[in-house]
Image: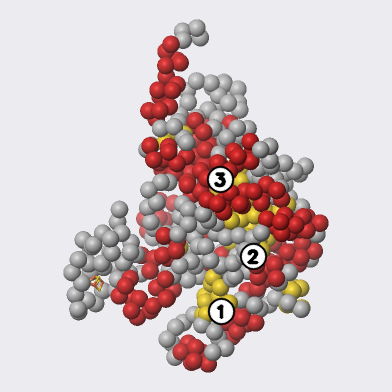
């Protein structure tokens, strides 16, 4: 495996030669007069700054780890079926992939489950600039696609126009905007908009404000994310902003009240302050009481999002979620992304997604055996397409249909919003790459495949203006993912998501099988083939 210890694109570093020491990542001969910035070398100048994804791209990029975890969704293969069909009449005129049903639901135990047109959610896109810059596209694209979107943590705290009274938020135009933009294109039947709250948000009364003033139906508590096991962080590019955020209770580094730090900032020694959120210390009893209190205060649904903590914590989280009977529990595995997380932490810490899913399924089995409630689950952490979604959901069917009701994706949707906005701008400026415009024309109404459908569905809205091109791009991407999922389902003759089963996938290695309990091809073959050839009664 290629080492990333001393050179990675995420920190903007490379080595002088490529045949590096496989353990340290250093050039085998490290020379005195080397002009190249490897990670150790760059750290001699920029120190702690090198812990983070390239500072220059902050706000206009997302970042993830680039480590090979030796087990991912590509280590499983989806099985194709020929005989019979599930969820549809086995009739050649009916068993067409377009007829596969990819609708799902969350809070399925409640009297009013949240319907999803497709089994995806956009989890926790909050105050980080890349989420804010692309919010309108993401919210409108998610709403038009009938999926859940969550406003991530710290939005009120970071809102420069927010008003606080006695430490509690009483007005946040930004949070209001986030909810309004989603609802503008929400059909009121499929999907929902949730507000996520962390330690600072709870202290600042964000849940109360969202429930009472903005009439939000869903509050999500946040215990973590897959990319890092410390609180959320963003960069602040002025002393005034750093001071404001410190005043609102955030941890700001360096201290903007320290004159020496301010002088260094003004002299250009560093260009941004870091704003950090606190980590919480969940306790089972108080979590259950908190969920009850949220419900009493008007939350129709309560979600929980957590990261990729150690196995005991996975079990603890499932226990808490079961007892509190929460409506949706999202586990976010290592391998996913973020607006800003320390690069070494993204690479080297937390449980990769497939391992995490295997752990939470073991917990679900134990809860089931005890006759306890298992909440609807969402898996996140590096998902970008329908094949991964299929495998994750199929793996989670431990009886009675997949426990994983939807897949959380953040980086891929942000990518579609950024790319679409950029290409639409290049089209306006006549700067589209020639190869692109030759192939797809230079008119966004043509080069976005789904633009005509969106215009037809929303005749009173101007596509490209009321519906930004970023939203069109997200919608178009999600249509591809949904169509791809339908094709895979039809290929395995499973026409409803509830039909997806663990034996619809095979492990490509004994290690993948050992971790997940999914059969390897040879194990499955020796299990099922004799039964077919030994019986001739059919
Ligand atoms: S400083 Fe040494 S290890 Fe780093 S790139 Fe130069 S030669 Fe290689």
Q: Which residue is mark 2?
A: 198
Q: Which residue is mark 1?
A: 252
Describe the element under mark 2 as helix, strand or loop. Answer: loop
Taking the spot 61% from the left edge, 81% from the top edge, the residue there is 246
* Label 3: how many Cα within 10 Å (few below 14, some 14–19, many 20+): some
Judged from this view, the residue extending furthest toward the top is: 537
Tell me the CA gap for discs 1 and 2.
17 Å
Q: Is residue 217 left or right of residue 198?
A: right
Can you say whether 246 is above or below 343 in the image? below
Q: Nearer the viewer, residue 214 or 124?
A: 124
Front residue (pair 231, 452): 231
Numbered disc in front, either 2 or 3: 3
User: In terms of image quarters, where does ligand 1 lie?
Assistant: bottom left
Let me know if residue 461 appears in the view.
no
Q: Residue 360: give its label.
A: 3
Residue that appears at 66% across and 78% down: 248
Looking at the image, residue 77 sits to the left or right of residue 258; the answer is left
Alpha-carbon span between mark 1 and mark 3: 35 Å
Dot 1: what SS? strand
- Sequence order check, earlier mark of 1 and 3: 1
Residue 362, placed above or below residue 69: above
Residue 157 in which image quadrant: bottom right
**Does the numbered disc 3 mark a residue whose Cβ is under 8 Å from ligand 1?**
no
Image coords of residue 201 (percent x, y)? 67, 68
Label whose residue precedes the other's in the sequence (1 or 2):
2
Specify few, some or many for label 1: CA neighbours under 10 Å numbering under 14, 14-19, or 20 or more. many
Mark pair 2, 3: CA separation: 23 Å
302 or 237, which is in the foreground? 302
For marks 2 and 3 on the same chain, the one whose residue lies earlier in the sequence = 2
């Amino acid at each position: 495996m290629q080492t990333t210890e001393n050179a990675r694109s995420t920190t903007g570093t490379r080595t002088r030669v490529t045949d590096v020491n496989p353990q340290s990542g250093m050039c085998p001969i490290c020379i005195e007069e080397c002009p190249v910035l490897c990670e150790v070398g760059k750290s001699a100048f920029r120190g702690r700054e090198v812990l983070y994804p390239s500072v220059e791209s902050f706000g206009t990029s997302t970042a993830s780890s680039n480590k090979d975890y030796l087990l991912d969704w590509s280590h499983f293969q989806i099985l194709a079926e020929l005989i019979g069909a599930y969820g549809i009449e086995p009739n050649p005129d009916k068993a067409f992939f377009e007829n596969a049903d990819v609708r799902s639901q969350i809070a399925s135990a409640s009297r009013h489950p949240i319907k999803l047109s497709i089994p995806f959610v956009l989890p926790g896109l909050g105050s980080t600039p890349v989420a804010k810059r692309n919010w309108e596209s993401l919210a409108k694209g998610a709403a038009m696609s009938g999926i859940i979107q969550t406003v991530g943590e710290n939005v009120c705290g970071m809102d420069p126009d927010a008003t606080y009274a006695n430490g509690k938020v009483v007005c946040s135009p930004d949070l209001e905007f986030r909810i309004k933009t989603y609802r503008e294109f929400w059909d009121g039947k499929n999907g929902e908009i949730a507000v996520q709250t962390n330690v600072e948000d709870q202290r600042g009364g964000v849940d109360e404000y969202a429930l009472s003033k903005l009439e939000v139906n869903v509050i999500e508590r946040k215990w973590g994310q897959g990319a890092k096991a410390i609180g959320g962080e963003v960069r602040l590019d002025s002393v005034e902003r750093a001071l404001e955020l410190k005043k609102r209770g955030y941890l700001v580094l360096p201290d903007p009240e320290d004159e020496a730090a301010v002088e260094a900032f003004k002299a250009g020694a560093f260009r941004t302050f870091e704003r950090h959120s606190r980590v919480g210390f969940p306790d089972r009893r108080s979590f259950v009481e908190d969920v009850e209190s949220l419900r009493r205060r008007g939350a129709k649904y309560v979600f929980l999002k957590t990261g990729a903590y150690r196995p005991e914590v996975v079990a603890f989280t499932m226990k808490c979620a079961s007892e509190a009977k929460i409506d949706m529990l999202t586990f976010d595995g290592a391998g996913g992304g973020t607006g800003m997380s320390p690069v070494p932490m993204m690479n080297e810490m937390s449980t990769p997604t497939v391992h995490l899913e295997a752990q939470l399924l073991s917990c679900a089995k134990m809860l089931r055996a005890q006759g306890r409630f298992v909440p609807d689950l969402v898996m996140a952490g590096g998902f970008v397409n329908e094949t991964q979604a299929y495998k994750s959901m199929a793996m989670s069917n431990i009886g009675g249909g997949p426990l994983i009701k939807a897949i959380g994706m953040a980086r891929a949707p942000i990518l579609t919003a950024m790319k679409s906005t950029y290409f639409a701008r290049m089209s306006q400026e006549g700067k589209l790459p020639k190869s692109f415009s030759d192939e797809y024309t230079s008119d966004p109404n043509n080069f976005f495949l789904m633009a005509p459908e969106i215009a037809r569905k929303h005749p009173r809205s101007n596509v490209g203006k009321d519906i930004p091109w970023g939203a069109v791009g997200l919608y178009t991407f999600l249509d591809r993912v949904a169509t791809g999922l339908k094709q895979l389902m039809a290929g395995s003759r499973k026409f409803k998501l509830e039909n997806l089963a663990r034996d619809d996938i095979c492990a490509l290695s004994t290690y993948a099988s050992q971790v997940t309990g999914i059969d390897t091809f040879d194990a499955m073959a020796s299990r099922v083939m004799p039964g077919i050839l030994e019986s001739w009664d059919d």
